Amino acid sequence: MEANTQLTFAIIGIVIGIVIGVVGYRLFSKSHRDIQKMRQKLLERDHQLAELKGGMGENLLSIQQRLDNIRHEADQLENQLNDDASRWQLEGISSHLDVPGQDAHSQATNLTPGEKPPSVPRDYADGSSGTLSEDFGLRDNQQAPQPPRY
């Protein structure tokens, strides 16, 4: 009888171990599947990001080429305008046109004799310290005006 009880305990122990193993495997395999799904999503998003970057590079290159074409056409139009002005003997046509491509030197040469070129903006103040104070423009002693009371 004692052998039967030991055999019964052994069989019950094996069955309980198998059940615990199956439950543990299901739990761990579920988290493993979730990790695999997350990795797959990450790889897909990395691939999409790489495609987007490639597409943006092509798009920016296309925009750059279009800008170059526009600049070239603007230069051609400006040359044609100057040629037509010289053919019709029109003087000072370029000073009347607002050409955004003119540099600072050409704009400074278009000034009238009494006119000074605009000054360069500064990031320092006149005086001994040479820097702007942090409370520049703030007034502590002045209060906000009160609205009239009726």
Image (cartoon, rainbow, N blue to C red):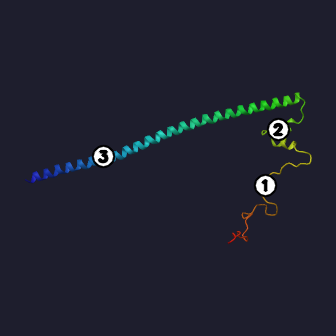
Q: Please name the amino acid that badge 1 sits on.
A: Arg
Label 1 or label 2, whichever comes before in sequence order: 2
Residue on which the image places disc 1: 122
Residue on which the image places disc 3: 26
- Res. 71 image quadrant: top right
Q: Name the residue rendered at 37%, 45% in the picture.
A: 32
Pinpoint residue 28: horizontal percent, then vertical percent: 33, 47
Q: Please name the amino acid that badge 2 sits on.
A: Leu
- Crowdedness near tag 3: few (<14), some (14–19) or many (≥20) residues, C-alpha within 10 Å: few
- Name, please, the residue furthest toward the top: 87
Is disc 2 placed on a helix, strand or loop? loop
Is disc 3 placed on a helix, strand or loop? helix
Q: Name the residue rendered at 40%, 42% in the picture.
A: 37
Residue on which the image places disc 2: 97
Q: Name the residue rendered at 78%, 32% in the picture.
A: 75
Cβ–Cβ under 8 Å for marks 1 and 3: no
Label 2 or label 3, whichever comes before in sequence order: 3
Looking at the picture, tell me which residue is in the foreground, 39 or 95.
95
- Res. 101 image quadrant: top right
